Amino acid sequence: MSRQFPWRLGEAEDAPFPPAETALRHPDGLLAIGGDLRPQRLLNAYAQGAFPWFSQGEPILWWSPDPRTVFATDGVHLSRRFRRQLRTLEWEITADTAFKQVVRACATVPRPGQDGTWIGTDMIHAYTELHRLGHAHSVEVWEGPELVGGIYGVALGRMFFGESMFSARSGGSKVALAALASLLYAGGVPVLDAQVHNPHLARMGATQWPRERFLPHVRQAIQQPMAPGNWSAAGARLPLRHYLPD
């Protein structure tokens, strides 16, 4: 199925999204336009396999690209060389202890080939509210008191949708991603959505699922019980080796 124009969302927070199968081919995955970033709208979007992605000053755009980049949570790859480097570091891992700090770092860290950020003030407020409600989570990488890497995203049932990650030290985002995958795997969440392909994710083990595989998995996974809540107890401050065993 396809449409010539993106669906314009209604004003109600629970206004329905169109089926993700109807997303545009050009630009790839554009599904809907408009609406807002209130919690129920965001949760409805993720449940449909969609996510918001837009620049400051643009209307809110909702996307569901095909194919979708995903990780098996037991399949994140760190090279042997990188693992050897990590053995010399005294980094520690936490979860849900510095959510807003992680999101702000993702918004402000310089990225090669990218001018500005899509994580504006409205996005920061929206995901911070989702975090307060127990649906959005972060994993943090620390060197003493300094935050050196992190990742955040949204959990629905037994599905996790990654949003963004950052490094303030070389390898910080890789460690955050690997630690998040370890936490998810231990909690019975088999798949981590990484949204859009890039070579960096592919080197770490990401694969691409066609829409006809991704959407049925999401619809099944979000129905499996996993109560919202804070992850700080599950991700108590632990040394890096706890998440990255030899």
Image (cartoon, rainbow, N blue to C red):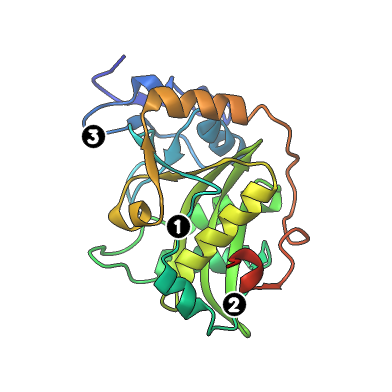
Q: Position of residue 216 (x, y in %)?
A: 50, 23
Q: Secondary structure at mark 3?
A: loop
Q: Nearer the viewer, residue 150 or 104?
A: 150
Q: As drawn, which residue projects farthest toward the top?
A: 1
Q: Which residue is mark 1?
A: 77
Type of residue at label 3?
A: Pro
Label 1 environment density (alpha carbons within 10 Å; few <14, some 14–19, many ≥20): some
Quadrant for the C terminus, please: bottom right
- Pointer 3 residue: 27
User: Which of the marked residues, 1 or 2, is nearer the chain's N terminus?
Assistant: 1
Q: Nearer the viewer, residue 26 or 84?
A: 84
Are the two marked residues, 3 and 1, in contact with CB atoms closer than 8 angstroms?
no
Would you say the residues marked 1 and 2 are in contact, meaning their CB atoms lie under 8 Å apart? no
Q: Is residue 171 visible?
A: no
- The spot of residue 53 in percent (x, y) is 38, 45
Residue placed under numbered mark 2 in the picture: 142
* Direction from residue 132 to residue 162 in the image, left or right: left
Closer-to-camera residue (97/91)? 91
Please report whichever mark, 3 or 1, sits nearer to the chain's N-terminal start. 3
Mark 3 vs 2: CB contact within 8 A: no
